[in-house]
Structure formats: C-alpha cells, structure tokens
Amino acid sequence: MTCDKCGAELHVGDFPFCKGQASDHQRGVSSVVGDEIDVWQMNGTRHPIHFRSRLERARWRKEHGYRVYDPHIGDPGSDKSKHTRSAAIMDPQTLENGRYLVTHRQMIDAEEPDEPLHVRWVNEDTGV
C-alpha cells in the first residue's frame, strides 16, 4: 500500500498519517506504563497497607483526602517557583558552618567525656 500524499510504501506497523513527507511514516513505539506496583503505605495510616495497583493506591488517597507531595510546584505558565530555589545555591553562613565542621572534626574525636560511661552488655539469649 502506498501513501496518497507522499507516495511512501506503507508496511504493517507504520504510522498511517503524514504531512507530505515519507519520514512521517516511521514505525510507532509503545511506551505503556503498567498498573502493577508493590508498595507499602506507612504514612497517614495506623497500620501499613500493601498496594499492588497504582489505581487502588490513588483511590485510597482520594478517599482519605491525601495527595502526593511535590515540593516543587511551578507558578502558572512556568516551571519556576518563587517558593523554591536550587539546592546548588548555598548562603555564606551555611557554607562557613560546613567548612568549620569538616576542619574541626579531629577536635571532636579527641574530646573525652566529662564522666566515664558505664555500659553493661547483656546476652539476649541467656540474660547475662
């Protein structure tokens, strides 16, 4: 079979519509995402709930008034938000605090506790 618009020869699996170019008839690709999941829901419930279906989990969230938390929701018409910023940006005080902690680590390790620690090891099997 040939296309009426571009004259390309069509085969089974080719995209049947074109804008006048033979390259528009490339084979289609299916990227279907299945409904199967294996998720344990532990937040928002007293006991864990096991979900095996995305639809079942979405239905449960809707019934209980929950939603998936997305920390970055862009402003209308944009993917940017005035409420979030890049994690790559760090203020000078935080940077200085991190530098101090890294360079003074040896001082932390060398400090001795004020009082001795009394530890008693117990074997769970024997109780001694």
Image: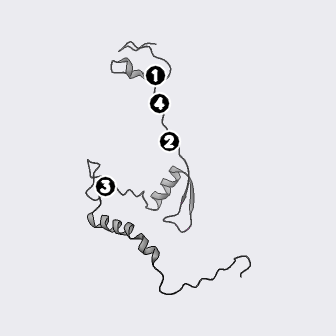
Q: Is residue 65 above or below residue 105?
A: above
Q: Which of marks 3 and 4 is in front?
A: 3
- Which of the 4 quarters of the picture holds residue 101? bottom left
Assess whether mark 3 and mark 1 are in contact (beta carbons under 8 angstroms).
no
Q: Residue at the spot x=45%, y=79% of the render?
A: 111
- Report the residue that reaches farthest toward the right: 126
Residue at the disc numbered 2: 33
**Dot 1 alpha-carbon crowd within 10 angstroms: few under 14, some 14 to 19, many 20 or more:** some
Visible in this render: residue 17?
no
Q: Which of marks 1 and 3 is in front?
A: 3
Q: How far apart are the alpha carbons under marks 3 and 4?
A: 35 Å
Residue 48: say if magenta. no
Residue at the disc numbered 1: 14
Q: How far apart are the alpha carbons under marks 4 and 2?
A: 13 Å
Residue at the disc numbered 4: 29
Q: In this view, does 24 lie to the left or right of 114?
A: left
Q: What residue type is labelled 4?
A: Val
What secondary structure is the stretch in magenta mostly built from?
loop
Q: Residue 82 placed where, x, y %? A: 25, 57
**Bounds of the magenta span?**
41-47
Q: Quick one: quadrant of the C terminus?
A: bottom right
Q: What residue type is labelled 1?
A: Asp
Q: Which mark is residue 112?
A: none
Residue 45: say if magenta. yes
Q: Is residue 8 above or below residue 127?
A: above
Residue at the disc numbered 3: 86
Q: What element carries label 4?
A: loop
Assess whether mark 2 and mark 4 are in contact (beta carbons under 8 angstroms).
no
